[in-house]
Amino acid sequence: MPGWNEYPVAGVFVGDHDVPVLVDNDVNIMALGECRRCWRGTVEDLLFVKVGTGIGAGLIIGGRLQHGARGGAGDIGHIRVAGVDDVVCPCSIGGFFDWGHDIDYRVVVRDREDGDVDCGAVHLSTSLGHNEHAHPMDLFSGCEGTFSTPASTGHGAADNLWWGFSARYTDRGAGDVPTLTGETQSQLYPKRRQAQHRTSGEGVSTQSAQDPAEGGGQRLTSINHGDWVAFDPVNLLNIDAIRFRVASAGPGGNIEVRRDAPDGELIATAAVPDTGANNNWTDVVVDVDDPGGTFALHFVFTNPAASPTENLFVFNFFEVQGVGVTGPPPVPDCDGTIIVGGSDSGVADRVTDDLWCASELLDDGRLWGNHGQLVSHVDAASERLVADGVPTPQERARIMRTVARS
């Protein structure tokens, strides 16, 4: 929360009042009050939903308040619901960038009541993230644009840094219905990520990096066969290789690069040699193919020949190679056939020159005042697509017959 990040709220109150002080968010406290005041002794599992400027929930299971791994239990503020504003999450969440570079963005908003969205009501704010908080940076208006990351962040190279952005759209309302605001948030990461800033992991510990050439603050150690760490979210858009900074007093081993889980899809394997000492650093580079989309990137450390307690190597950081999010945008997955008015035209969906699926441009799910409005929209949109060489005239005729009968 801006202005309150890392503020010692509990400590301030304890200093003035000689009582225990606990701090939690509003909906969690409301859920506890509801459970204990109204349902004590009769209900142990409860979901309390609060609708205000956002949507949140307090989750109680077995009589105990649930916070989740990162405080996100009950966070239902971003669920797509038919008929309401939808600010579509960017495709490259967790992508990689260089400091001091320009990054193009496009915000997609779907509103079933407004139909054509006013891009002047779309706002994008950026922030410099550091650990669990963020410093506001710039504010932009419009559905498309470019933002720049600073060349200097004012933080050390070993700090846990990220670049955040939030897209917001406020609709026009309707009659007595007030305006509604949809929002989505995301983050990008610098190409070098320190191993100690893992999202999760098993079996490893940290100690001073002892890497004069590259720094890094801390390194991962006590790495045994089968241990792993994960970084989430990650998107390997326009990434060609990963460089690992490692050292080993023996016996070395492998770093398996996997998707979503320690036993998930194998993306690549990097072989870590015995370098003779845990401060004799080397770089191991492995080529990777982007599996597509955003996922939890897992590094699984293996050496089946080592004893279960034998330390394989130490790990300082990894650095991705490639242009990342400053390169070409991702190509959407346009499988299936084009559906218009709820009816299947049988015409194969495909990607347009400006990286949309043709089906999204023909029928974007908005609420139409009558069937004729839908037909007119599909007629005009399909004509533009034919001019761009996306469907053939014969395919357009099939689409129009389908929408006319829908």
Image: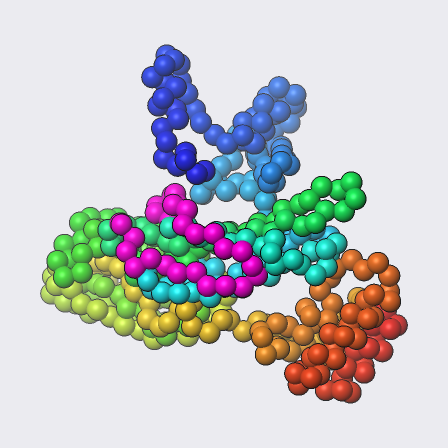
Residue at position x 33%, y 62% from top? 100
Q: Is residue 221 visible?
A: no
Total label count?
0
- Residue 342: give x, y in percent of width and height: 79, 66
Is residue 380 part of the magenta span, yes or no? no
Q: Is residue 169 visible?
A: yes
Residue at position x 18%, y 53% from top? 209
Residue at position x 37%, y 50% from top? 128
Q: From this viewpoint, which residue is outermost toward the top? A: 18
Is residue 145 part of the magenta span, yes or no? yes
Residue at position x 56%, y 40% from top? 74
Vertical arrangement, residue 229 with respect to residue 265, above or below: above
Of residues 176 and 111, the one drawn nearer to the viewer in this rendering = 176
Residue 162 falls left or right of residue 204 = right
User: Which picture quadrant has residue 299?
Assistant: bottom left
Q: Which residues are magenta?
A: 129-155
Vertical arrangement, residue 102 with respect to residue 48, above or below: below
